Image (cartoon, rainbow, N blue to C red):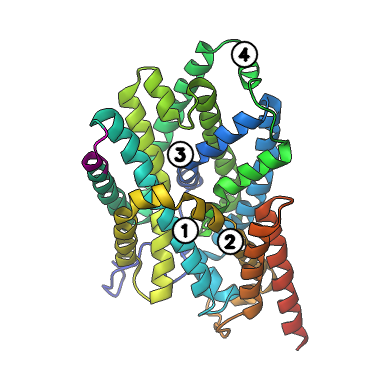
Amino acid sequence: MGNNNQKVDVDYSTTAVPQSARRSMITMFMIMLGFTFFSASMWAGQEMAAGLDFWGFVGALLVGGAILGLYTGLLGYVGAKTGLSMDLLAQRSFGIKGSYLSSAMISFTQIGWFGVGLAMFAIPVANELLGGSTFAQYALVVVAGICMTASAYFGIKSLTIVSYVAVPLVAVLGTVAMVKAVMLGEGTIIDQFAVSSGSLNIITGAGLVIGSFVSGGTATPNFTRFAKSGLSGALTTVVAFFLGNSLMFFFGAIAYIFVGGNDIFEVMLRLNMFGFAVLVLGLNIWTTNDNALYTGGLGLANIFNQKKKPMVLVSGVIGTVAAVWLYNNFCDWLNVLNCTLPPVGIILVLGYFMNKKDYEEGAELKTVVNWFAIAGVVLGAVVANLVPWGIPSLNGMAVAAVCYVAGELLKKKA
């Protein structure tokens, strides 16, 4: 409660987070690490293990992790330095109404991944525990959807609690299962990776590393705005994302080598760790799904000028109702959409560094639509999805950066 007896928005969905509400570095690290614990990232690990030997796998992790870390670290710095969410940052770089585009894109993508995540939990658990009936799958989707929506509804406090519980359990239990699987295999882990087809190179593998989490990483400011300083926001993001993503890739790789699958859940089942398998799968998805739904709610709140909490509920209902359909039909489309968000992120970063006065407290927002920013996102998305060479997300960012910088230079000369 504030001094004027008005309720305080603890998630600061329409204002900058004040220093009094900032959180410790360890809390930010746990939140950001939990964000990366997503089963879909294991799919990339499976592809990398199928196409790279061990040292190629490690090289791809380092190259892709460095690029992803630079991108998300800059976003983490800007979010912490300004205290602004992704959508509030977009109001300054895209314009007040221009920000609706980026908000719609991030909301649509994150609500989609939320639904996919629900199905990724419900379907394998129902198959193993409840005979695989359609009713059991949908029932688990509903139960998981309600639980995850409820925790996202209560905002950053709930995200913190879930992360503190889930991160140590997933990291420890998943690593134990991974080590046991390697020990049961023939030879060293290097020998086991040698079954790779050799169909990928390090650059292609690095592209998988970047593409697996670059869309979610674009929402980094939504969480680092609670960090105490720009340096804290950047460091926790870079370290947490590198460690968390690397762990997920290794989980997926070992799952492919050990059972021919893509999820540590399957490995743990083979090791007769069923109870732990369900726990790890559920918590793994919960941490990322909460962050995804939180981001989706903030985006819808910006578009419809509503409070965040009801928009989180709307997002949760949509994701839950459509979960199985999204899982069966929409994963390819979501991967296409992943290429559309990096152009948004690079414009948010450039907008801050080129126009810092617009981010000061009390600065008046005058731009309704920044058409150069809009053009940058559209052209960047087209290039990222259609140009066959290079790394798609980097191609898109390069085009978007050129468009935005050109527009800002023209504006300053006018």
Of label 3 and label 4, which has the lower sequence position?
A: 3
As helix, strand or loop, the secondary structure at mark 3 comes to loop
Q: Circle 2 sits on which residue?
A: 340
Up-down: is 304 above or below 299? below
Q: Circle 4 sits on which residue?
A: 188
**Residue 72 highlighted magenta (yes or no):** no
Up-down: is 296 above or below 178? below
Mark sitting on residue 39: 3
**Could you give the CA–CA distance between mark 4 and mark 1, rounded to whole angstroms?**
39 Å
**Could you give the CA–CA distance between mark 2 and mark 1, rounded to whole angstroms?**
10 Å
Q: Circle 1 sits on which residue?
A: 109
Q: Residue at x 36, y 62 (%)?
A: 10
Q: Examine the residues drawn in magenta and state their main secondary structure.
A: helix
Of label 2 and label 1, which has the lower sequence position?
A: 1
As helix, strand or loop, the secondary structure at mark 1 comes to helix
**Could you give the CA–CA distance between mark 2 and mark 4, rounded to whole angstroms?**
40 Å
Local crowd size for mark 4, using a 10 Å CA cut-off: few (<14), some (14–19), many (≥20): few
Q: Amino acid at mark 3?
A: Ser
Residue 48 shows in the view:
yes
Q: Which residues are magenta?
A: 132-137
**Could you give the CA–CA distance between mark 2 and mark 3, rounded to whole angstroms?**
21 Å
Q: Relative to the observer, which residue lies in front, 187 or 335?
A: 335
Up-down: is 32 above or below 77? above
Up-down: is 345 above or below 356? above
The location of residue 34, given as percent across then percent down, is 45, 42
Q: Relative to the observer, which residue lies in front, 231 or 73?
A: 73
The location of residue 15, given as percent across then percent down, is 45, 71
